[in-house]
Amino acid sequence: MQQIPAMFIAGDAALDFLNSLATPVDVPVDWLDDAAGLLSWLAQAQLVSAPVLRQVRSQCSLGELNKIAEQARNLREWFRGFVEKHRGRPLAREDLKKLERLNRLLEKDGCFNQIAPTAGKQGNAFELRVMRKWRAPEGLLIPIAEAIARFVCSADFAYVKACEGPTCTLFFIDQTRRRARRWCSMAVCGNRAKQSAHRQRVKANR
Ligand SMILES: [Zn+2]
């Protein structure tokens, strides 16, 4: 199980999913490399609630969950290809055929509404809560597919960017007002770039 907390710097869960494979320092880390990693990442990403994760853990074998982790990695690398190809310009209607894989996953969803007590003491006693039938361990992929689907339906791909850090593989959506974001984070790649520019200047002055 991964001890390093996963990274959520992308501004959207779909891109954070891509960033679950990254090189935070020197060594590549895959947060989805096994069942425990996948469950932990889903919890950190708040895509699946803790009670559901407990239920899944008790009902599925480790082998089944490892297989789902592998499917999640396949889905991630497929989506990485899509993002690499399409980022930098808005999506077009013709791109839908490349997203069939997501629609196939989404149609397996077993969502339904339930009347549930509201959390707070004030206001209405009940609220309508969306629940999901967890028919199979494969259901764990559906919240991910949903996050990706929501992203392709709402994000402007013109502002999907890859960090400019020379060895960085992180993606993000640039939500800054001037659309000038260049780095996954100022603290990591932004600083590295500043230091290397500084070194270049010192070298040039010598
Ligand atoms: Zn970076």
Image (spheres, helix red, strand yellow):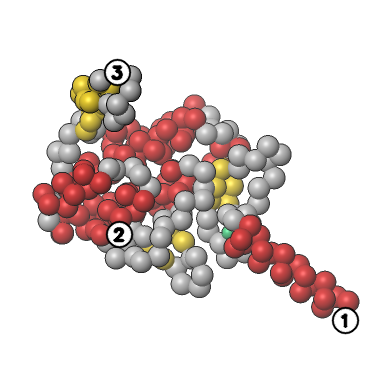
Considering only order in the chain, which callout, 2 or 3, is on the residue closer to the N terminus? 2
**What is the spatial separation of the Cα atoms under label 1 and label 2, in whole angstroms?**
49 Å
Q: Is residue 107 visible?
A: no
List x then y, in percent, for residue 85. 53, 45
Q: Which numbered disc, 3 or 1, marks the residue closer to the eye?
A: 3
Task: Name the residue nearer the viewer: 88 or 121.
Answer: 121
Disc 2 within 8 angstroms of ligand 1 (CB): no
Kindly give the residue lying farthest to the front in the view shown. Answer: 121
Circle 3 packing at 10 Å, graded few (<14), some (14-19), many (20+), is few
Kindly give the residue lying farthest to the right in the view shown. Answer: 205
| Above/below status of 106 relative to 3 | above
Q: Which numbered disc, 3 or 2, marks the residue closer to the eye?
A: 3
Task: Name the residue nearer the viewer: 112 or 171.
Answer: 112
List x then y, in percent, for residue 59. 11, 49
Considering only order in the chain, which callout, 2 or 1, is on the residue closer to the N terminus? 2
Quadrant location, ligand no. 1: bottom right
Task: Name the residue nearer the viewer: 119 or 196.
Answer: 119
Kindly give the residue lying farthest to the top in the view shown. Answer: 124
Helix, strand or loop at label 1? It is loop
**What is the spatial separation of the Cα atoms under label 3 and label 1, in whole angstroms?**
72 Å
Quickly name the residue at label 1. 206
Circle 1 packing at 10 Å, graded few (<14), some (14-19), many (20+), is few
Seen at 49% across and 30% down, the residue is 154
Quickly name the residue at label 3. 124
Cβ atoms at labels 3 and 1 below 8 Å apart: no
Quickly name the residue at label 2. 37
